[in-house]
Amino acid sequence: MPALAQDKLYTINDIYSLPDGERAELIDGQIYFMAPPTRKHQDIAGELFGTIWEYIRANTGSCRPYVAPFAVFLNENDRNYVEPDISVICDKSKLTDKGCSGAPDWIIEIVSPSSRRMDYFTKLFKYRTSGVREYWIVDPEKNRILVYNFESEDTGDYTFSDSVKAGIYEELYINFSDIAKLLNI
């Protein structure tokens, strides 16, 4: 969703001042309002979160996965606040009662029509420059999963027929064909 025409830079206080139920993200002082997610979006997020959560638990991992809405304060300023669909944080010192202070290790965004430009461009640049290690863009309308591993500078392009390896883990693969069958995508 495009940023509002603005003469000033907004802060996290402006996000917290929004009316109840209204959600927005803040990137470099620009507010981006968020449309409610669709059922398909939530189904995909739930399946991905469940797979990641089970993998971490089964392997007694120290990372913690979170599903939106979960506050991520990307930088050491008050002008960046996002709510990724899924965040995986391995450095527990970043976790506070309010959310995550600093870049998560892994972020997954599920594209919706209103978030397409944000997910593919604005957030891609912001996540890369703020220290996120790995960023996935899951686009059910385009049958596409883009994987950006910023540490190794690798990019992968997959479909909902593929099994995709998580770069931050040695043995975690997410089988998107299982998700597609389960959700009739």
Image (spheres, rainbow, N blue to C red):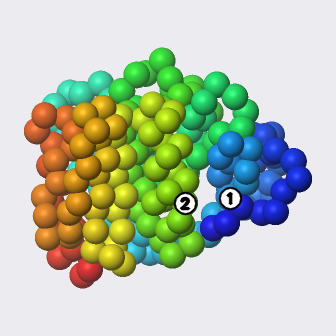
What's the residue at 64%, 42% (across, down)? 81
Relative depth, front residue between 153 and 22: 153
What's the residue at 27%, 74% (across, down)? 143
Say whether residue 92 is visible: yes
Which is more N-terminal, label 1 or label 2? 1
Q: Residues within 10 Å of mark 1 (few under 14, many from 20)?
A: some
The residue that disc 2 covers is: 118
Say if mark 2 contacts mark 1, CB within 8 Å.
yes
Q: Is residue 45 left or right of residue 165?
A: right
Q: Amino acid at mark 1?
A: Tyr
**Rendering coords of residue 156 (x, y %):** 22, 54
The residue that disc 1 covers is: 32
Say whether residue 65 is visible: no
Q: Is residue 133 left or right of residue 127?
A: left
Extreme right residue here? 7
- Which SS class for mark 1? strand
